[in-house]
């Protein structure tokens, strides 16, 4: 591991100021991802600015009935928070489906959003990987990729500097994407709010960048807008073992059911793309239509029609289609 | 780079100089001789290094020692009071909840965390009623909540009843 200086600030602005002059520095949240990547030689910061308890550790009510989640709220506390369990079951379930009790106690909301892909070539410094070492190529396309993306990936061949088929690993982010959360960020020029849809980015021509954040921008909080019908919501995750594993495919969904009609619906998918994937094609097909299994299947198939799988991850297409369908059937049958 | 810190492990304060790269796990084991927590993977994947940090279970391999200053670290050893084993220690012995014992201190620290989380009414991924006031640590709940602790000897079948016994005593299992 590269040597580094450990710094603490007294307030968020102080942390931003500390990192502004450190091009190779990084913020440290719970460290459950960053310390691991440093040990593997994948992340090599020369300064760590500890922000684990620097931003808010509170969950506050917003005037519209939504919630503001401090970036330092641990994942476990957020899942245990009564207002989250009552208003946004899909968010509590997504958090509880992630990692282990120990990790959730330590991991922060801000760090969870910015955790890096679990592509095995990214975490192995002896392998080619455009995300870790731009221009080195992509080991995964012709190698082990059964856990990687089927939607929105860039594949111009193993040697192209653009190619990356990584997935975003966070469960929480999938629920937040369905809920249209926004991310509050503090930078050298002050504070701004980013819709979560614009936080994570597709690999495009620069797989090394996971997000649109500039170096040194500090996440201070996540705002989750009110969504009264999110009481009818759910997070489902399929993985290689029953617990303590990343998603192969996951679904976060909420439904506004009026009689037998889908008045409104939110669907986001995890494990299928470089970003938490909002299923807008499926949502548009379902909105205003009948809440029937046939309609759910048609919408799910339409969403996955754009999928472009490789030899070993094509199974994710029927898996995602079936999971969207089953989740919507369950929501339609659930008591609100 | 070296930093001066004081670590409080199982009730004892020790000032020491650590390289910033040192994990809490390595600082305890290599510097303080506190070898209760074990190193299985060093990547947060096995739970052998589980300790309570200010009463919350965490993986000490992913905690940098410099960040633990001013916090109370409790290992499985430290759960015993004045030579008297903790109820979890007795239950693990009574139920034969180990074979080689390597994962055991992590299992026990983790179980102590599980009991505390259940007392707070926190749900898990297998909890049906997310808004229930109280937690009932059924076998399925214990398995899910303890899933961050792997046991290479697969003593799971005896770990679950050991934790269940203490859960009953503590009023978090029907
Ligand atoms: C064995 C294992 C299994 C796991 N399983 C799952 C799983 O199933 N599902 C899942 O979703 N996750 C899983 N995780 C990942 C875990 O959820 C993340 O490691 C955790 O959420 C990261 O949070 P942290 O606070 O520890 O972040 P850190 O490791 O501290 O930081 C992560 C990144 O965010 C940056 N950062 C941190 N805070 C801020 C901030 N406030 N502003 C700007 N930048 C910041 C850091 O610089 C770093 O780049 C698993 C992890 C492990 C080790
Ligand atoms: S998929 Fe992306 S992260 Fe994985 S090896 Fe290819 S470039 Fe690297
Ligand atoms: S040694 Fe820490 S989780 Fe394995
Ligand atoms: S008792 Fe041997 S690893 Fe668990």
Image (tube, coloured by chain):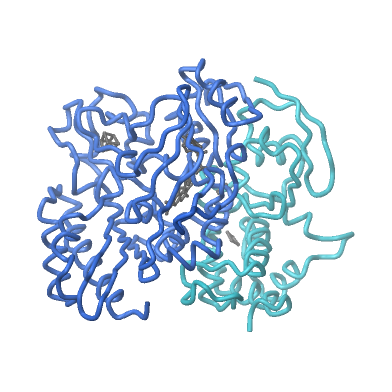
Chain colours: A blue, B cyan
> Ligand 2 falls in which quarter?
top left
Q: Nearer the viewer, residue B99 or A2?
A: A2
Q: Residue furthest bottom?
A: B174
Q: Nearer the viewer, residue B44 or B71?
A: B71
- The image quarter in which residue A121 lies: top left
Q: Residue furthest right?
A: B82
- Judged left or right of residue A180, residue B105 is right
Residue displayed at 74% across by 34% down: B31
Which image quarter holds the C terminus of chain A? bottom left
Q: Position of residue B155 (x, y in %)?
A: 57, 68
Relative to A148, is B119 above or below? Answer: below
Relative to A5, is B171 above or below? Answer: below
Residue displayed at 72% across by 50% down: B54
Q: Position of residue A304 (x, y in %)?
A: 14, 56
Relative to B132, is B75 above or below? Answer: above
- Judged left or right of residue B159, residue B7 is right
Q: Position of residue A119 (x, y in %)?
A: 32, 41
Residue displayed at 60% across by 25% down: A14
Q: Residue furthest front?
A: A63
Q: Nearer the viewer, residue B10 or A71?
A: A71
Q: Residue furthest top?
A: A21
Relative to B60, is A11 above or below? Answer: above
- The image quarter in which residue B22 lies: top right
């Amino acid at each position: 591991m590269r040597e580094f200086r450990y710094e603490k600030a007294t307030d968020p602005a102080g942390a931003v100021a500390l990192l502004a002059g450190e091009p190779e520095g990084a913020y440290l949240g719970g460290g459950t991802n960053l310390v691991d990547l440093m040990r593997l030689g994948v992340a090599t910061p020369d300064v760590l600015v500890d922000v684990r308890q620097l931003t808010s550790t509170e969950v506050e009510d917003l005037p519209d009935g939504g919630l503001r989640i401090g970036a330092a709220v641990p994942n476990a506390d957020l899942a245990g928070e009564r207002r989250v369990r009552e208003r946004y079951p899909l968010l509590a379930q997504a958090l509880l489906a992630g990692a282990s009790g120990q990790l959730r106690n330590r991991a922060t909301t801000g760090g969870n959003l910015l955790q890096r892909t679990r592509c095995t070539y990214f975490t192995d410094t002896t392998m080619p990987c455009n995300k870790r070492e731009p221009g080195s190529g992509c080991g995964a396309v012709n190698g082990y990729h059964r856990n990687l993306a089927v939607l929105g990936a860039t594949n111009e061949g193993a040697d192209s500097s653009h190619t990356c088929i990584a997935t975003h690993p966070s469960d929480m982010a999938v629920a937040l994407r369905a809920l249209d959360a926004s991310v509050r960020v503090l930078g050298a020029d002050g504070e701004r709010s980013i819709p979560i849809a614009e936080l994570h980015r597709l690999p495009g021509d620069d797989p090394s960048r996971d997000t649109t954040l500039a170096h040194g921008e500090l996440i201070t909080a996540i705002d989750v807008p009110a969504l009264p019908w999110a009481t009818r919501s759910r997070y489902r995750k399929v993985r290689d073992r029953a617990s303590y594993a990343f998603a192969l495919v996951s679904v976060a969904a909420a439904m506004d059911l009026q009689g037998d009609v889908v008045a409104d619906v939110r669907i986001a998918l995890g494990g299928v793309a470089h970003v938490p994937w909002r299923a807008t094609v499926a949502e548009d097909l379902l909105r205003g239509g009948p809440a029937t299994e046939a309609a759910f299947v048609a919408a799910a198939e339409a969403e996955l029609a754009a999928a472009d799988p490789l030899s070993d991850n094509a199974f994710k297409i029927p898996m995602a289609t079936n999971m969207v369908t089953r989740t919507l059937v369950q929501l339609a049958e659930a008591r609100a | 780079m070296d930093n001066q810190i004081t670590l409080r492990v199982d009730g004892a304060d020790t000032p020491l100089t650590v390289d910033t790269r040192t994990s809490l796990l390595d600082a305890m084991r290599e510097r303080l001789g506190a070898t209760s927590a074990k190193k299985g993977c060093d990547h947060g994947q096995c739970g052998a290094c589980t300790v309570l940090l200010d009463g919350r279970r965490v993986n000490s391999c992913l905690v940098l020692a410099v960040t633990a200053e001013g916090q109370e670290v409790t290992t499985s050893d430290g759960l015993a009071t004045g030579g008297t084993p903790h109820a979890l220690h007795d239950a693990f012995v009574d139920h034969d909840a180990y074979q080689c014992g390597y994962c055991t201190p992590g299992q026990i620290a983790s179980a102590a965390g599980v009991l505390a989380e259940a007392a707070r009414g926190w749900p898990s991924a297998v909890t049906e009623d997310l808004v229930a006031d109280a937690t009932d640590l059924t076998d399925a709940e214990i398995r899910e909540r303890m899933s961050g602790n792997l046991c290479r000897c697969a003593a799971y079948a005896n770990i679950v009843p050991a934790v269940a016994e203490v859960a009953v005593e503590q009023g978090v299992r029907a």
